[in-house]
Image: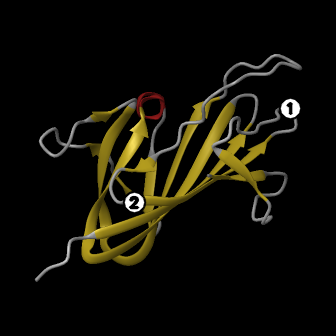
Amino acid sequence: RFLPRAVDARLAAQADIDAADTIVRETIRFDVAHVPLEFVTLLVPEEVARAAPLEVRQNGHLLHPEPAPPDEAPAAVGDAVRMTAMLERPLLGQGEILVQFTLPTPPLRMEATLQHDLPIVLPADGRLGRQSVSLSPSDAVTAEPRGDDWKRDVTGQTAVGGRAWIAV
């Protein structure tokens, strides 16, 4: 008797925001049980897939994500594109991948409030548990999440000058 693959994931995102660019660095930590994970499928927001070179790494090794084959799953899910990357080494147990991309920061006026969505790349398969985001704006920008989906993380595990939130 064989048990099916079980995948749990946790996501931590760091966004460095200045007047010109927003650099997003994500760490997706996986816990894989029973059957090794040989590739990872990501839900990449269209804005990221269109505008930004997407850098995905496992153990420092650059992976090459490509749109998922149409016979495997729908290429687009909502406003996200499914992208698949072969892992450097199959993953069984705990491991992580790093995702990084840069997007232009929307134009800002002095003393103005701008509501803007920060796109986040998500794992497509498995169960997504804890999600956290840390924002490190430049001196010229103030940034924080809106709404009731995020609560302030007071554990103090953020970059210098940054603040962190946890999805609720």
**The residue under label 2 is which amino acid type?**
Arg
- Tell me where residue 165 appears, x and y as whole percent: 70, 52
- Tell me where residue 83 appears, x and y as whole percent: 31, 44
Decide: is 1 above or below 136: below
Q: Which quarter of the image is occupied by the N terminus? A: bottom left
**Residue 70: which numbered mark, if any?**
none
- Tell me where residue 104 appears, x and y as whole percent: 62, 28
- Tell me where residue 8 appears, x and y as whole percent: 41, 66
**The residue under label 1 is which amino acid type?**
Ala
Residue in the picture at 28% in, 68% down: 37
Real-space CA distance between mark 1 and mark 2, rounded to the nearest whole angstrom:
37 Å
Decide: is 122 above or below 22: below
Q: Which residue is mark 2?
A: 127
Decide: is 39 above or below 49: below
Residue in the picture at 82% in, 35% down: 142
Residue in the picture at 42% in, 30% down: 46
How many neighbours does mark 2 have within 10 angstroms: few (below 14), some (14-19), or many (20 or more)? some
How many neighbours does mark 1 have within 10 angstroms: few (below 14), some (14-19), or many (20 or more)? few
Please identify the quarter of the rendering in which residue 94 is found: bottom left
Query: What kind of element bears circle 2?
Result: strand
Q: Which residue is mark 1?
A: 140
Q: Earlier in the sequence, mark 1 or mark 2?
A: 2
